[in-house]
Image (cartoon, rainbow, N blue to C red):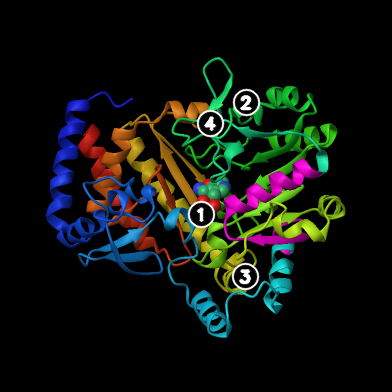
Amino acid sequence: MYEDRGRLAALWETELDVFRAARPASHAEWERAERHMPDGVPMLWMAKWPGPWPVYVESASGAHFTCVDGIDHVDLCLGDTGAMCGHAPAASVAAISAQLARGSTFMLPTEDAAAVAEIMSSRFRVPVWQFSLSATDANRSLIRYARQVTRRPRILVHDYSYHGTVDEAYATLDEHGNVVARRGNIGAPVPLDQTTSVVQFNDVDALERALATREIAAVLIEPALTNIGIVLPEPGYHEAVRELCSRYGTILIIDETHTFSAGPGGMIAELGLEPDAVVLGKSIGGGIPAGAYGMTREFADRVRDSLDLEDIDVGGVGGTLAGNALSLAGIRATLSEVLTPAAFTGMIDRSTEWTAGVQAAIDEFEVPWQVTQLGARSEYSFRATAPRTGREAADADDFELQQYLHLHALNRGLLMTPFHNMALMSPATTAADVERHTVAFREAVVSLYG
Ligand code: PMP
């Protein structure tokens, strides 16, 4: 906990003044936009930025964007991973534009579909693929499939995980260990303890107790938590998860939407994991809506054998635009030409430099924070040691402090991921971009602890 709240409040006010003075054009956009959109944004979470009004974007390229006030920013948020490939990557733009000119959606496959399924299979260790418009929808579809074939009612998630707007996944544990809706769950459909079991990350015993009930259709997990800071798996955890899911007949779904930052085949390839199903989304389309879910042959066959084509259009797994030609053209170009193994090497090097820059300031001023790197993604948290569970990570949260650090960065032309202290590197991010953050971060630490 940062103790000097008076100092923090004063620093915040100073940064607000800097922001207001520098961004009149964004202010004008916001005034107009507020008339017909809540908080002046097309999706309410775009209002969850530090500062009195949102920054309106003019254009973006690679790791930079320019706002309507003409200010250049290094984008370390990258659309919260949606733009992990960098903004407007040339190969993706060319392929998407060419497909757009040939037609974008047919409810029929194009040649890109088979090529994309081959690439996904070679990277993520499962051989059968389906496509969606988002990671959320991929998760929803797999949960349905898992329930369908296991005929079990419940799913299991980690405490403080996030898997998109999936009703069942909005569960958390209260201080007595009961399953409850997570804070802010909008219009909760049914009590979460009816649909979902929750365990702490890295807690093998709790997982075994939950799975032994044989009520769990699917375990839906990120291989490292990335939505409450980064929480890494302890040695042996994934092996235990795999073994327990097999023993109790539960489908293991690994959601790589964010952890794809670990390498060209995500953590699945890095650690040699063996899921029954895999979810990708956000970045794979090169910036346009695209999601994907892969399955083992065995799981895919069980699903297929349980379905009747006559009912498939309204069976609960679908989406009119899912698997459309435009998305598939985007995925093909992005994976084969932009998010390549060679690109990941550079992205991870930049992330290592970013992490070292943060660590240097923490060490110099003996700040009780820590930083965790996961491939091309890195994040600091307001606690001295790396968290082992989502709960530990959540307990270190300090919203005011985070807002200050983000506004401080924004005023120096650096965009951090709004919901946490995360920075992501694209293939276009340079060492100079990273250095800009290192300098600004040290300055922020000096303002708080110097
Ligand atoms: N899975 C994970 C791990 C995520 O972090 C998110 C979004 N942050 C999603 C799924 C959902 O992605 P989308 O909102 O693009 O559907």
Q: Which of marks 1 and 4 is in front?
A: 4
Give the vertical position of 404 relative to 127 (above or below).
Answer: above
Residue pointed to by mark 3: 324
Task: Tell which circle, 1 or 4, labels the residue nearer the N-terminal end.
Answer: 1
Contact? badges 1 and 2 (CB < 8 Å): no
Q: Where is residue 323 in the image (x, y as percent from the top left)?
A: 65, 66
Q: As displayed, is residue 244 above or below residue 91?
A: above
Q: Does the magenta stretch include residue 264?
A: no
Q: Residues within 10 Å of mark 4 (few under 14, many from 20)?
A: many
Residue at mark 4: 390
- Range of residues picked out in magenta: 122-148
Which residue is depicted at the point 65% across and 31% down? 196
Q: Earlier in the sequence, mark 2 or mark 4?
A: 2
Q: What element carries label 3?
A: loop
Residue ID for mark 1: 376
Q: Mark 2 points at which residue?
A: 193
